[in-house]
Amino acid sequence: MRFNVRCVVSWMALALLFGCVGNDDYIKTGEVRYEKAANLSRIDDILSHSIQKPEDILVVFDFNYTLMYPLTPCLHKINVDAHKNEFKRIISQLSYEQADKMLTQMMVTQNQKLINERLSAFLKKYSKVNFIVCSSSLEKNVDAYLNLLNKNGIEINNSYNLQGVEFLEFPKYLSGYPVYKRGIITTNRCSKGDVLVSFFRRIAQKPKLIIFVDNSTSKLEDVQAAIKSLKNVKLIIVEYLEYKDKPIPKVSKKEFSRYWYQQVKNFLHTQT
């Protein structure tokens, strides 16, 4: 069955898209503080002014367009939007599942760059704080994300001592389930908020403060709604804006078409 191209364009746009300093003592359990961050300095400010002990804090980062972004211009929203009809025409050769597999595979096989080169130093500064990465990507991409981060000198650490987890309580999609491995969660297209709640229930040392950082407002809203079910937890959600300042080159319609035709051709070749 051909999938709804409008849905794909919208999904692609979401996937490729994306205050004052104070402490968290005024956030009551069940309440949410909303922040916007131009870069890591804002996250640094939030952590340095928190009244919580480092071991009681969990910072959750999105991966794509929050920690890293691809160097290929044709993968970016500015060019997908500029050539929307062409993208629609080319991608319609694939089913929804095929397009999902192809696009997520491209996001881990293309050259990637850290959005902020200070990330390694930032993580070392807050070595006693718990960190995880949570991406809505497919289950099998967890190892690719670990490799991409490791190549850039990034290691995601926490004190939860949780081994690899497969979240079997969620629906199966493309032969996989949400997974956790070495600080990385890939939700396999399930709700980020729901998978994070399931993760929290598995760890013995519950965080008292969760800082959730994502470039997507829809993901922020999803997590905000889900975290309300947790007791004795304060939440700060941070819309991360640094990617929007990156100078992404614009490409011509001819270049855009050639690139995407080749990607679809390559993908279909691997499926035969």
Image (tube, grey):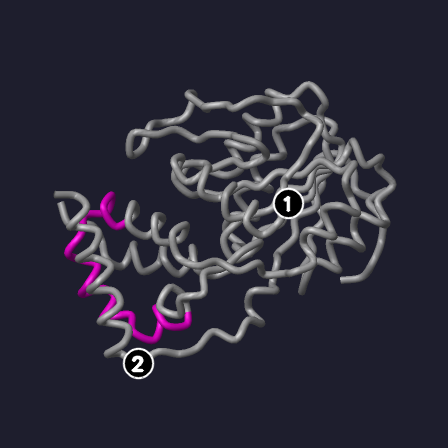
Disc 1 packing (10 Å; few <14; some 14–19; many ≥20): many
Query: Looking at this view, is 54 or 127 the one in front?
Result: 127
Q: From the image, which quarter does the N terminus lie in? A: top left
Residue located at (71% from left, 25% from top): 206
Look at discs 1 and 2 and give the one toward the viewer. Answer: 2
> Taken as a whole, is the magenta stretch helix, strand or loop?
helix
Residue located at (76% from left, 32% from top): 208
Query: Looking at this view, is 250 or 198 the one in front?
Result: 250
Residue topped by disc 1: 212
Residue located at (76% from left, 38% from top): 129
Residue 45 falls inside the magenta stretch: no
**Amino acid at pointer 1:** Phe
In the image, residue 29 sits, relative to residue 126, either above or below, namely: above
Q: Is residue 105 left or right of residue 127?
A: left
Q: Identify the magenta region.
A: 78-99
**Residue 29 point in image, percent of width and height:** 75, 34
Residue topped by disc 2: 252
Residue located at (54% from left, 49% from top): 151
**Amino acid at pointer 2:** Ser
In the image, residue 132 sits, relative to residue 167, either above or below, namely: below
Q: Is residue 7 left or right of residue 130?
A: left
First in sequence: mark 1 vs mark 2: 1
SS category of the residue bearing label 1: strand
SS category of the residue bearing label 2: loop
As drawn, the residue found furthest toward the bottom would be 252
- Indicate the quadrant where residue 265 lies: bottom left
**Residue 219 point in image, percent of width and height:** 52, 48
In the image, residue 67 sits, relative to residue 211, either above or below, namely: below
Q: From the image, which quarter does the C terminus lie in? A: top left
**Residue 115 point in image, percent of width and height:** 58, 61
**Residue 172 point in image, percent of width and height:** 33, 28
Q: Is residue 215 left or right of residue 32?
A: left
